[in-house]
Amino acid sequence: MYEEAREDGAFPVLVPSGLPSGWKSVSADYQPHSGGATMRVGWRSPDGGALQLIESDIVPGVLIPRELGTDARANGSVVEAGGRQWQVYDAREGEVAYVYGEAERTVIVTGKASEEEFREFVGALQ
């Protein structure tokens, strides 16, 4: 999945590297289309948490409500991990999301997992 997204070239692709054993990729999808491309990869943490990595070149004003729900809001927290500053969102159905944006892409990590697992995962993205 990562290779397909890289070859398409719609946006720079981040891949988790150096995660401790027990992290497992459980789903993957890449959808290129005229409105922008989106890659989604589901992950399970060693402790049973569930995270989804979403990367896209769709504008954040469209992408964030579509992926996190129309009521999703930044809660004012910022997490520094992996050399990036991630805005923390309260998302749909009690999920948390870390959101990082650049001009050419938006990266979202969302799901239900401990704060430690979120930080470990986003810190491993390269």
Image: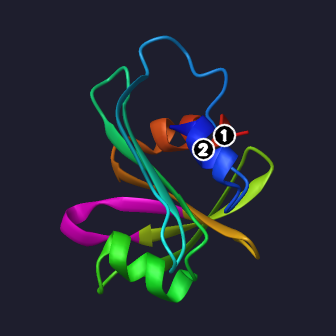
Q: SS of the residue at dot 1?
A: loop
Which residue carries the number 1 mark? 125
Q: Residue at x 44, y 77 (%)?
A: 64
- Magenta stretch holds residue 94: yes
Mark 1, other Cα within 10 Å: few <14 / some 14–19 / many ≥20:
some
Q: Return the residue found at the far top.
A: 21
Q: Position of residue 43 (x, y in %)?
A: 38, 34
Q: Residue at x 44, y 61 (%)?
A: 97
Q: CA gap, disc 1 to disc 2?
A: 5 Å
Q: Are marks 1 and 2 in contact (CB under 8 Å)?
A: yes
Q: Position of residue 77 (x, y in %)?
A: 57, 70
Q: SS of the residue at dot 2?
A: helix
Q: Could you tell me the amino acid type at mark 2?
A: Val
Q: Residue at x 60, y 44 (%)?
A: 122
Residue in the foreground of this view, choosing between 103 and 125: 103
From what the image shows, is residue 1 above or below residue 18?
below
Which residue carries the number 2 mark? 122
Instruction: Using residue 4 as the reference point, say whether residue 96 is left or right of it.
Output: left
**Could you say which quadrant of the image residue 51 lies in?**
top left
Where does the C terminus fall, quadrant-wise? top right
Mark 2, other Cα within 10 Å: few <14 / some 14–19 / many ≥20:
many
Read off the magenta span: 90-98
Q: Could you tell me the amino acid type at mark 1?
A: Leu
Residue in the foreground of this view, choosing between 126 and 115: 126
Instruction: Using residue 18 as the reference point, say whether residue 55 is left or right of it.
Output: left
Numbered badge on residue 28:
none
- Magenta stretch holds residue 122: no
